[in-house]
Amino acid sequence: MFIYNVTVHVEPIVEDKWLEWMREEHIPAVLSTGKFTQAKLFKVITDQDQGGVSYATQYHCATSKEYELYLNENAEGLRKEAQDRFGSSILAFRTQLEEILSL
């Protein structure tokens, strides 16, 4: 399994609107690309006071090929939409994870 992980630091002033947008629009839009089989949204609970809260969204796919297709065909537009809507009130950090062991 391959996981595309997007961790986003969200300023408190937009947190509720961002969460609603993620649940109702963004995550469904990413899944509708057909590149990912599921998505999970997590709140980061590490005790760090950075003037906001962080969330991690994990998008699952069978192989890195689907992820590469997503990057080439869909990612730019979806990222732009987030920046246009929330601007500097959010800051995203993206990582790719490959499952090595599942017990």
Image (cartoon, rainbow, N blue to C red):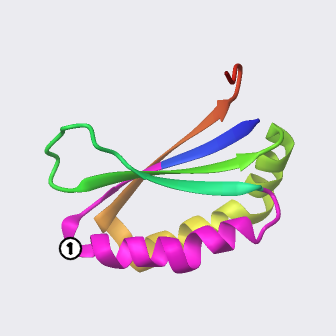
Position of residue 31 in the picture relative to residue 91 (left or right)? right
Q: Position of residue 31 (x, y in %)?
A: 71, 66
Residue 67 against residue 26 in the figure, above or below: above
Q: Quadrant of residue 48?
A: top left
Residue situated in front as seen by the camera: 78 or 21: 21
The x, y position of residue 85, in whole percent, is 43, 79
Percent coordinates x, y for residue 102 in the rendering: 69, 24
Q: Going by the image, does 38 lie left or right of 85?
A: right
- At x 80%, y 62%, the residue is 73
Taking the spot 70% from the left edge, 19% from the top edge, the residue there is 101
In the rendered view of the protein, which quadrant contains the C terminus?
Answer: top right
Image coordinates of residue 88 in percent, x first then y, are: 31, 65
> Magenta includes 13?
yes
- Residue 30 magenta: yes
Identify the amino acid type marked 1.
Answer: Ile
User: Label 1 neighbourhood size at 10 Å, few (<14), some (14-19), many (20+)?
Assistant: few
47 with respect to 29 (left or right): left
Query: Quick check: can you spot residue 86?
Result: no
Depth check, front residue: 29 or 82 = 29
Name the residue that disc number 1 marks: 13
Region of the chain picked out in magenta, as a range? 7-35
Q: Quadrant of the N terminus?
A: top right
The image quarter in which residue 98 lies: top right
Secondary structure beneath label 1: helix
Q: Quadrant of residue 80?
A: bottom right
Q: Residue at x 56, y 54 (%)?
A: 40
Could you tell me which residue is drawn at 76 percent across and 55 percent down? 36
